Image (cartoon, helix red, strand yellow):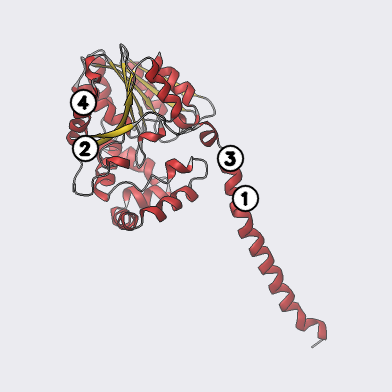
């Protein structure tokens, strides 16, 4: 064997090692670049209003005015999604922003089920304690919070007269909702395959801090303060929310009931948001005079984080 041939495997191994090290070194840089250039990261600011526990819910509240605004967040999230720009609504409105039952600082590890009625009862208690039912109410809701907002408005049509939904997961049927979730590998594991989802939630509950950092690493385009709070829930809270407030929702019936009671509903999506069926939403708007649809160009599912001023202005209207 020629002398030079003995060195080739060593040189090749060193080359592969250098490439591997360089690739691993580039990952944090790529994450950082995506993070600092993300509109959601650049636009979001931490909330400023004080918060406290009211019954089963943690909520921040402030301001006064002739109208009230209540903001409801989406799945595995908290009220902090609605950051400082939304707190400015307290200058002209009574503003209340809860962490929904079972999530965030409203975490409840003792409950084994979270039916919709429990969510609504908790919101009712919060509304009474914060005085928002003393005036007309507008609800702003993101993603999963949209269906909860419609249920709550149906319970109080004389008080809640307007609902603005961003990124509502509207689908024509539960089967379509499951098919839409099945289009994502992550959703198949964490939303539809309950065996894996329950196992992951069990690990999440034992290691919430580590799970929060993993969530932040997984979603570089979102503020880390928000993604690190994603593990603040239990398996029953997640299971019941995704089934009752995302999959098994009869959107047509819910919108018809509110339109019949003159409750105005605005469905707002980013054009790049594929969580909800925009066309079906437009069909429903065509059937009901008090339902309208707005599409925002170049935006995705996290519209309330990426465009807080636009969303807050819509609520002020």
Of labels 2 and 4, the one closer to you: 4
Label 3: state its secondary structure.
helix
Residue holding disc 2: 56
| Sequence-wise first label, 2 or 4 | 2
Q: Residue at (69%, 66%) from the top-left corner?
A: 18
- Dot label at residue 129: 4
Mark 3 or mark 2, whichever is nearer to me: 2
Alpha carbons under labels 3 and 4: distance apart: 39 Å
Q: Secondary structure at mark 4?
A: helix
Residue in front for this viewpoint, 22 or 253: 22
**Which circle's residue, 3 or 2, is located before the other in the chain?**
3
Which x, y percent locates residue 297? Answer: 53, 25
Q: Work out how far the residue at label 1 is from the one at label 2, CA to CA, in angstroms.
A: 41 Å
| Placement of the N terminus among the 4 image quadrants | bottom right
Query: Mark 4 or mark 1, which is nearer the start of the sequence?
Result: 1
Few, some or many residues within 10 Å of mark 2 (<14, 14–19, 20+): many
User: Does the CB distance between marks 2 and 4 fall below 8 Å?
Assistant: no
Which residue is tagged 1? 29
User: Contact (CB < 8 A) between labels 1 and 2?
Assistant: no
* Quarter residue 237 falls in: top left
User: Is residue 172 something one can see in this rendering?
Assistant: no
Using the numbered discs, state the Cα–Cα distance from disc 3 to disc 2 in whole angstroms: 36 Å
Measure how far apart labels 3 and 1 are at the Cα level.
Answer: 11 Å
Ranked by sequence position, the earlier of labels 3 and 1 is 1
Label at residue 36: 3
The kind of secondary structure element at disc 2 is loop
């Amino acid at each position: 064997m020629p002398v030079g041939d003995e060195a080739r495997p060593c040189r090749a191994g060193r080359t592969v090692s250098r490439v591997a090290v360089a690739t691993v070194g580039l990952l944090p840089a790529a994450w950082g670049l995506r993070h600092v250039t993300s509109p959601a990261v650049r636009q979001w600011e931490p909330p400023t209003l004080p918060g406290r526990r009211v019954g089963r819910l943690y909520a921040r509240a402030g301001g006064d005015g002739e109208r009230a605004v209540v903001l409801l967040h989406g799945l595995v999230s908290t009220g902090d999604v609605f950051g400082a720009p939304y707190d400015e609504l307290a200058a002209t409105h009574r503003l209340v922003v809860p962490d929904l039952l079972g999530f965030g600082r409203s975490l409840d590890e003792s409950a084994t089920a979270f039916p919709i009625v429990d969510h609504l009862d908790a919101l009712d208690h919060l509304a009474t304690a914060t005085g928002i039912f003393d005036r007309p109410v507008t609800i702003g809701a993101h993603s999963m919070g949209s269906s909860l907002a419609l249920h709550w408005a149906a319970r109080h049509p004389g008080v809640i007269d307007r609902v603005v939904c961003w990124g509502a997961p509207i689908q024509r049927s539960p089967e379509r909702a499951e098919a839409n979730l099945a289009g994502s590998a992550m959703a198949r594991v964490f939303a539809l395959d309950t065996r894996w989802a329950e196992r992951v939630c069990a690990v999440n509950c034992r290691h919430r801090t580590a799970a929060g950092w993993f969530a932040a690493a997984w979603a570089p385009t979102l503020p880390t303060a928000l993604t690190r709070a994603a593990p603040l829930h239990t398996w029953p809270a997640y299971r019941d929310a995704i089934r009752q407030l995302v999959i098994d929702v009869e959107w047509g019936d819910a919108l018809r009931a509110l339109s019949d009671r003159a409750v105005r509903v605005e469905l707002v999506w980013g054009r790049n948001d594929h969580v909800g069926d925009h066309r079906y939403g437009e069909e429903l708007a065509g059937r009901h005079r008090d339902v309208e649809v707005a599409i925002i160009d170049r935006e995705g599912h996290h519209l309330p984080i990426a465009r807080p001023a636009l969303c807050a202005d819509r609520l002020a209207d």
